[in-house]
Amino acid sequence: MAHPAHPRKESDVTRPERITAPNPATGHPKDLRFCTAQSLAAGEPLAGTGVHPEKTILIQWPKARWRHSLKIAEDMDPDITAAIEALSAAGWRVNLIDRKGEYRDTIRVFIYPEALAFDLAPRALANFLVSLPEGAAALDDFGPTPADTPVVLCCTHGKHDRCCAKWGFAVYKALAAEAEARGDFDVWEVTHLGGCRLSAGVLVLPALRKYGRLRPADAPDLLDAEARDTPYLPCYRGASHLDQAEQVAEVAALQHFAKAGIRGPARVRKTQERTYAVTVGTAIARVLLQPDEVTTPGTCADLDAARPIAPKTVWRAQVDAALADDGPAPSCPPNPNPNEERP
């Protein structure tokens, strides 16, 4: 039968550690047993990795029962498993969530983009999931409430990739503590979000903004930015509705304009091959992209299996020209050192 969430013991979680300090001679992390360190050493950019499905279902389930799958837990009833698999096949992203110290007899479920929350009896979960494709009206009997508080999901899925435990749990704790003090965010641990090599990874809903390489010290500034409904640029991966190249152009322009105090939503338009116009308010930037290659494992499993790693194409951005109300704005450096960690 389905089990509601219950508290975990300290032994259920893997204590995170910090990335080993960079080698002074190379700037690369010394400890390359982790895909996150490999990605950083290879100079893989964060920008361009922000894709995430809009149709998202979050199901509270005890973390101790999570396995490698992002959506199926060890003790789920077959009817729940079948309903989840059917939703996944139909295009929904299904993730499991949990948090330390949750005591409840019901199962909390969120659905997006509707931004609705449900507290379900365990026996009702399968019927709820089967009803979901029929639309929000079919869910009225399950007691929906508006999910008005932004939800912050931090991947701590160590059974999927060890980087997510190593760096994710420390960031989760920092975000949870900061959110508790503020009172304006709902923070959860979550299963695999994609991009284990970019740990710690975070997704904010309903904004659908994705972040990577977060550290505990980033928690206050990230929540400050999200409270203003703006991305936290040092760790921002790009708008989820844009393709890879458009995300790179978007992030480059946002970072460029932020130096001049210009902030706001970005509109990205391709003007010619590898050239994009990005508009923020009344400011317009021309962003030039150049392809590059990095060779880095996608997950720690690639390292463990010693599989050959094929290079992947990434985009490097240069803000070639920018105009605002007060005239030309200075161009940002075309290729900042991607191996440098933030201070």
Image: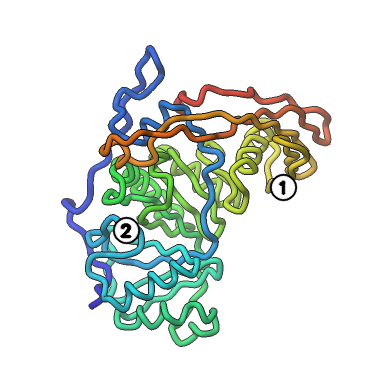
Classify 10 Å Cα crowding around label 1: few (below 14), some (14-19), many (20 and above).
few
Image depth: mark 1 or mark 2 in front = 2
Q: Nearer the viewer, residue 239 or 187?
A: 239
For the point 31% across and 79% down, which residue is it?
79
Residue type for callout 2? Ser
Q: Nearer the viewer, residue 242 or 230?
A: 242
Q: Quadrant of the N terminus?
A: bottom left
Disc 1: which residue: 267
Q: Earlier in the sequence, mark 1 or mark 2?
A: 2
Percent across and percent down for residue 58 are 41, 65
For the point 40% across and 38% down, which residue is it?
215
Visual colour scheme:
rainbow
Classify residue 34 as left or right of residue 327: left
Disc 2: which residue: 69
In this rendering, the answer to whether 86 lies above or below 325 is below
- Element type at marker 2? loop
Q: Nearer the viewer, residue 228 or 200?
A: 200
